[in-house]
Image (tube, rainbow, N blue to C red):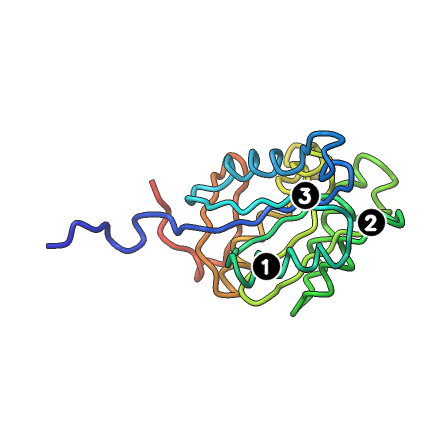
Amino acid sequence: MSDSPPIGSVPDRVRIGLVSISDRASAGVYEDKGIPALQDWLSRALRNPVEWETRLIPDEQPTISATLCELVDTALCDLVLTTGGTGPALRDVTPEATLAVAHKEMPGFGEQMRQISLRFVPTAILSRQVAVIRGHALIINLPGQPKAIAETLEGLPQAQPPAPGIFAAVPYCIDLIGGPYLETDDKVCKAFRPKSAQRTPRP
């Protein structure tokens, strides 16, 4: 008799790529805060075992595109999150590098991130975050500041009116492109799926 657990009794393992894009942080001028902020939030939000792939790179469009391709095509990440390089400055080329490797664009993610940030600063309209699908992976550009990263992922549930965070839609999106079943801690982020796509809740 097998000692292995029944199918579905253990959360699916997920591989997540985290990319911090900054000339100065990658050169060691200051400490990178983007990757630690992403890992902290995701570790609290996800119930799945996670294998991390982290990269700290400069604002160079060919390097960013190559890194995204490597994380998806070689490291086989299911989800890739970038931070930094999404403003209007000449060195901000993360959106262009991301779109260059896309098979499909998912504009709703960027639209909602800007709506959340506009609750705080009018300059949020200058942000250019995009989200795309490459193969069986979802790639999302996030803001550069740790506080803004958490706000856009988690949303503003206490605000009036509340603003949904983008991560609530990530698990179902990954379902639809053939990735693992992401389970979230509802106290941090309640994932939304149609009833037909939901597994039996885990105790």
Residue under pointer 3: 20
Q: Position of residue 85 (x, y in %)?
A: 78, 47
- As helix, strand or loop, the secondary structure at mark 1 comes to helix
Point 44% across, 60% down: residue: 197
Q: Residues within 10 Å of mark 2 (few under 14, many from 20)?
A: some
Distance Cα–Cα, label 3 vs label 2: 13 Å
Q: Name the mark nearer the viewer: 1 or 3.
A: 1
Q: Earlier in the sequence, mark 1 or mark 3?
A: 3
Local crowd size for mark 3, using a 10 Å CA cut-off: few (<14), some (14–19), many (≥20): many
2 or 1: mark nearer the eye: 1
Residue of label 2: 92
Q: For the residues marked 1 and 3, what is the alpha-carbon distance in whole angstroms?
A: 15 Å
The C terminus lies in quadrant: top left
Q: Secondary structure at mark 2?
A: loop
Q: The disc labelled 3 sits on which kind of residue?
A: Ser
- SS at mark 3? strand
Farthest residue, direction bottom:
103
The residue sitting at the left extreme is 1
Q: Is residue 85 above or below residue 175?
A: above
- Mark nearer the N terminus (2 vs 1): 1
* Residue 93 rendering spot, x and y as whole percentages: 80, 53
Q: Indicate the amino acid at tag 1.
A: Glu
Residue at mark 1: 70
